[in-house]
Amino acid sequence: MKTALLVMAAGIGSRFGGGIKQLAAVDSCNHIIMDYSIHDAIAAGFNKVIFVIRKDIEADFKEAIGNRIEAICAANNVEVAYGFQSLENVPGEVPEGRTKPWGTGQAVLAAKDSIDCPFCVINADDYYGKEAFVKIHDYLVSGEKDFCMAGFILRNTLSDNGGVTRGISKVDENGYLTEVVETSDIMKTPTGASVNGKEIDADSYVSMNFWGLTPEFIQTLDDNFKVFFEKTVPTNPLKAEYLLPILIGDLLKEGKTRVKVLETKDKWFGVTYAEDKPLVIESFAKLIAEGIYKEDLYSDLA
């Protein structure tokens, strides 16, 4: 069965004011974080990769990873496609002064012409671990009609270098998502985690924008983008964002969808801040030393 990995990479570089540090090497063989996600997805059984990027970073992106991944994917019978997220691709007028695209919901819509099978969505600059890819893939090919989400444990997703945004998630006794609350500035503390100085449950599930979705969702996404543009954008024209966790949370409240949470105990890491980079390099070196990955990353796929 065909399944796709959609990599949201349009925002790379935006937090670093210039250089695209998420495209910098994290190991001795010049792999970047995205390489590990793509490796894990192909190993889990995904057979299509869709990159969502901005047109202005296309050359840098293809030089750093795109051309190389196309060759690796061709050798493993994996299809590669691109979608381009832009400020202007909207169902209405772009507000004067707006400079950034419209968030993760629009990122997925940018790839709608390439989505022809069940798919999962990930961030480009996050390392998720192998377990989640296997669980999401197996769920997508099981024939289930409900969506799914990789449920990470909050304490496994924090940065030593500042606050992070996570979708704090509540799950019922059957493992289905009941609520996801996008929460900013979650800080790592000696005892766990806090928001605005108040301790929160560091063992709660969080969404890391790792969703398993169906092609039919694209119509829902498209319809709600029009509503977002009509109702939300006028209230906050320069900063309003169309975010997957918020839309999915609204659909849950309205009883229009169900989302199975698939727990993963793997530890997240990524380059939320430039200062995270040394720890990321150290973490990959440890995974290679432990035999989790080969130094020649893709050599075990053939």
Image: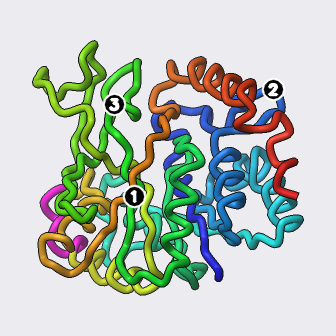
Q: Residues within 10 Å of mark 1 (few under 14, many from 20)?
A: some
* Type of secondary structure dominating the magenta stretch: helix
User: In this view, which residue lies farthest toward the top?
Assistant: 190
Say whether residue 69 is magenta: no
Q: Residues within 10 Å of mark 3 (few under 14, many from 20)?
A: many
Determine the image quadrant of residue 283. top right
Disc sitting over residue 167 in the figure: none
Q: Position of residue 185 (x, y in %)?
A: 25, 31
> Which residue is labeled 1 in the image?
262
Asked which secondary structure carries label 1, the reply is strand
> Which residue is labeled 2 in the image?
28
Instruction: Identify the residue at horizontal 56%, vertical 67% (top origin).
Output: 137
> Which residue is labeled 3 in the image?
155
Determine the image quadrant of residue 209. bottom left
**Magenta range:** 228-236
Asked which secondary structure carries label 3, the reply is helix
Horizontal placement of 171 versus 119: left or right? Answer: left
Amino acid under label 3? Arg
Q: Earlier in the sequence, mark 2 or mark 1?
A: 2
Asked which secondary structure carries label 2, the reply is loop
Q: Closer to us: mark 3 or mark 2?
A: 3
Q: Earlier in the sequence, mark 3 or mark 1?
A: 3
Amino acid under label 1? Leu
